[in-house]
Image (spheres, grey):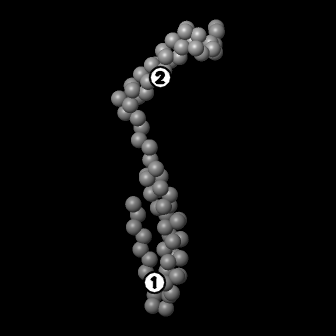
Amino acid sequence: MINIKVEGSQSESNSNILRRFSRRVRNAGIVEKAKSLKERKRPPSDTQKKQEKLRRLRRLEEVDKMIKLGKLPDRRRRS
């Protein structure tokens, strides 16, 4: 991260110093970078991918079974 330092003169008001600091922070893009790091989503691990695929396959088998039993209408594509 970038450190931003703003020094004011004796005659400069606190609001002016704060305004200059805020402008430098905004122009440096520090806030946007921090937000993007905060909301970063980790890529799924191999184990997570495998579990998700198994979950999908179990659901597909369950739907096929329900269709064969006549409890669900057959909406699969016929090719």
Percent coordinates x, y for residue 62 in the rendering? 49, 16
Q: CA distance from mark 2 to mark 1?
A: 61 Å
Residue at the disc numbered 1 = 8
Percent coordinates x, y for residue 45 in the rendering? 37, 33
Instruction: Say which residue appears at 44% left-offset and 47% top-offset.
Output: 40
Instruction: Say which residue appears at 41% left-offset and 74% top-offset.
Output: 5
Quadrant placement of the N terminus: bottom left
Instruction: Look at the picture and state if 79 lies above or below 18.
Output: above
Residue type at mark 1 is Gly
Percent coordinates x, y for residue 31 in the rendering? 48, 61
Q: Residues within 10 Å of mark 2 (few under 14, many from 20)?
A: few
Quadrant placement of the C terminus: top right
Q: Residues within 10 Å of mark 1 (few under 14, many from 20)?
A: few
Element marked by disc 2:
helix
Q: Earlier in the sequence, mark 2 or mark 1?
A: 1
User: Label for residue 49?
Assistant: none
Element marked by disc 1:
loop
User: Label for residue 56?
Assistant: 2
Q: Residue furthest left?
A: 47
